[in-house]
Amino acid sequence: MNTLNQDIKQKLSHLNVLEKIIAINVVVFFVGFILQALTSTLPSHSSLLWFELPSQFSEVLLAPWSIITYAFVHYDFIHMLFNMLWLYFIAQWFLNLFNKKLAINVYFLGAIAGAAMFVLGYSLLPNVFYTGNRLVGASAAVRALLVFMCAYMPQMDLRFFMFNVKLWIVGAAIVALDVVGLFGPNSGGNLAHIGGALLGLFYALQYKKGNDIGKGFEALVDTVTGWFSKTKKSPLKTVHKRTKKDMAGYNKEEFDAFTKQKRIDIILDKISKSGYDSLTKEEKEFLFKAGK
């Protein structure tokens, strides 16, 4: 048993942050499935009721955690599978270009924006979006990541069978499908998708200007995780001699990482303006190695 636990911990430690979110979604899905099978008194598709997002604002106030937890709940296997496949492929792409904190910010703020759009729609247009519905699924958060990429590098080509398609066209097509979906049976879900997409678009446009709108959320997450940290500050102060020279206030490793990220940002900015083909051979090789 100890060996099995060690193997699981080792495999989890090698997952990137978005792959860990995928793992959590899969575990939650099977927990809900098992609870549904064991508890016959629960209504269909409601074994994780406390984690679903209500459509009524008054109910959301009583369960504020649901603005995030709903994004980890899936009752339909196909729904969960497609969301996680999308997230897996986006993760490989996103984290080759940006850091994990940005990925977390976009993902969770996308989920929150989707929740806000869902509740707002049901509050303002109750006759259009019938009350009593509840929201589940990671689609809004996944939309935020995808649209962020499409908005940040709109002129980048995406290979689609035998054709190259600009990223902005991919993003626009997905949002258009969500708008059409507002008139279908899953109108509430499509409302949330649009909320996540709008967050991804706004985040990318601001990020290109040098404004990271997720810094406040990032600080909040760091504060909350700090409450559960096992490490405690030592009352004793350790004095040590620096063996590495500082560069502009950074040690060599930090300075190298900073300059590398700045070069990546410059290349990404060039792609967003002129497309991937405008890069020199050296820039393409650098971006490929950075992704590795």
Image (cartoon, rainbow, N blue to C red):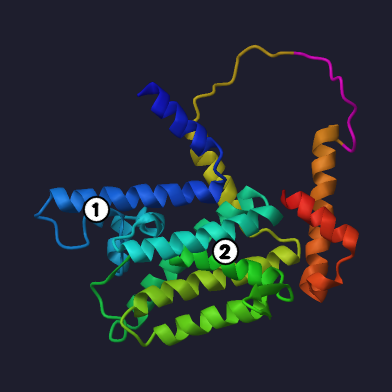
Residue 103 screen position, x and y as percent: 59, 54
Q: Residue furthest front?
A: 162
Q: Residue at x 38, y 78 (%)?
A: 121
Residue 33 circle label? 1
Over which residues does the magenta segment extend?
239-248
Determine if the magenta segment contains residue 89: no
Of the 4 image quadrants, the one containing the N terminus is top left
Residue that appears at 38% across and 73% down: 189
Rounded to the nearest angstrom, the CA distance separating label 1 from label 2 is 28 Å
The secondary element bearing badge 2 is classed as: helix
The amino acid type of the residue labelled 1 equals Phe
Q: Is residue 246 magenta-colored?
A: yes
**Residue visible at 87% across and 24% down in the picture:** 244
In the figure, residue 53 lies in which quadrant? bottom left
Task: In the rendered view, tell whether residue 75 sits above or below residue 131.
Answer: above
What residue lies at 78% left-to-right and 50% top-to-bottom? 289
Q: Amino acid at mark 2?
A: Leu
**48 sits to left or right of 267:** left
The image shows residue 228 at horizontal and vertical percentages of: 46, 32
Residue 87 % position (x, y): 51, 60
Res 198 quadrant in image: bottom right
